[in-house]
Image (cartoon, helix red, strand yellow):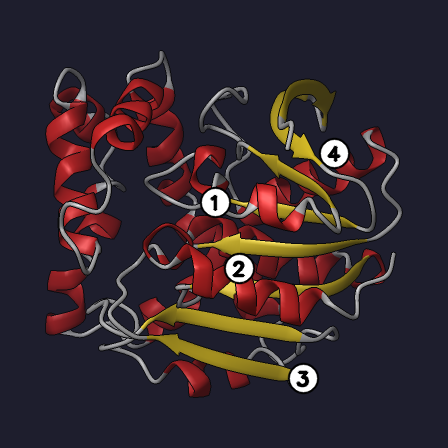
Amino acid sequence: MKISSRTTRANGIRQHYLTAGDGPPVVLLHGFPETNYAWRYQIPELAKEYDVIAPDLRGYGETDKPSSGYEKRTMAMDVRELMRALNLPKIALVGHDRGARVATRFAKDHPEVLDRLVVMDNVPTRIVGRELDAAKAKGYWFFLFHLVPDLPEALITGREDIWLRHFFSDWCFDPLKIRGEAFETYVKAYRAPGAIRGAMEDYRANASDVAQDNADASVKIACPVMSLWGRDFKLVGEMFDMPRVWAELASNLVTHAIPECGHLPHEEKPEGINRLLIDFLAGWKG
């Protein structure tokens, strides 16, 4: 399966994306601390039936890293304008972590061009904030640290490997799941100019994101939604009642807790995740 690496200008920035296959379009949005490389196990399988597009989010990977535009409404518009640039009238959308936040905002802002939605290992930002207590604040320390202006960039630059090793080891059921070529690929990506700042600005948009989400909190996502998460990730599956969380956002909902899995289901349990995706996407005919 040939996977092509391409760029196009959309929503005022140069967007990098991977693409493969032919058929109804499926867009994959990565999370933190990843890039679109995260979907390396999904793209070849999904591309057997679908036109798969996996962009680097604004601020990440090979996509531009501007100084602004990281609130999720603008990042969702990045996806909408990418669709226009690629002449995609409607999509199925899969998002993990930060990408799931973008995908959720996309589902609220652009329901007419979305057929179905998958969200992986994500508690919406407004719900994290609403339910934050001492135990959750300890687990979500990085939410707060990444908000501090300039200091994270100063402390992380030159130590990207230490920073990333912490997250990958702490967040995966197998602490050495992301190693070797995969780990080095991520380290290289986050050593690129502006990459740390881009990731930090994504988090620094939290206040705007919560305001946007509170404004239409009563509006449920219209399309079918599948929420899946790592059962053993302490910050999601262990801290939150995930079926209840996502029942707040979606009426047409299916949920799956993935056993012996942490924050990166698509990388930790790719075969099982691919089966769930293929089954959920089966009704998407374009």
Q: Specify which label sits upstream in the sequence, 3 or 1.
A: 1
Which of the two residues, 94 or 133, is positioned nearer the viewer here? 94
Q: Earlier in the sequence, mark 2 or mark 4?
A: 4
The amino acid sitting under disc 1 is Tyr
Q: CA distance from mark 1 to mark 4?
A: 23 Å
At numbered mark 3, what does the secondary structure look like: helix, strand or loop?
loop
Q: Is residue 32 above or below residue 7?
A: below
Do we see residue 248 in this rendering?
no
Circle on res. 274: 2
Amino acid type, residue under disc 4 in the picture: Leu
Q: Relative to 254, is 142 on the left or the right? A: left
**Residue that label 4 marks:** 82
The answer to which of marks 3 and 4 sits earlier in the sequence is 4
Q: Which mark is residue 252?
A: 3
Q: Mark 2, residues whose alpha carbon is within 10 Å: few (<14), some, or many (≥20)?
A: some
Q: Residue at x 57, y 73 (%)?
A: 226
Question: Mark 3 and mark 1: span between their CA atoms?
Answer: 27 Å
Residue denoted by label 1: 41
The amino acid pointed to by label 2 is Asn
| Eye-nearest disc, 2 or 4 | 2
Where in the figure is residue 110, as x and y percent of width and height? 77, 57
> Going 72% across and 28% down the picture, which residue do you hit?
11
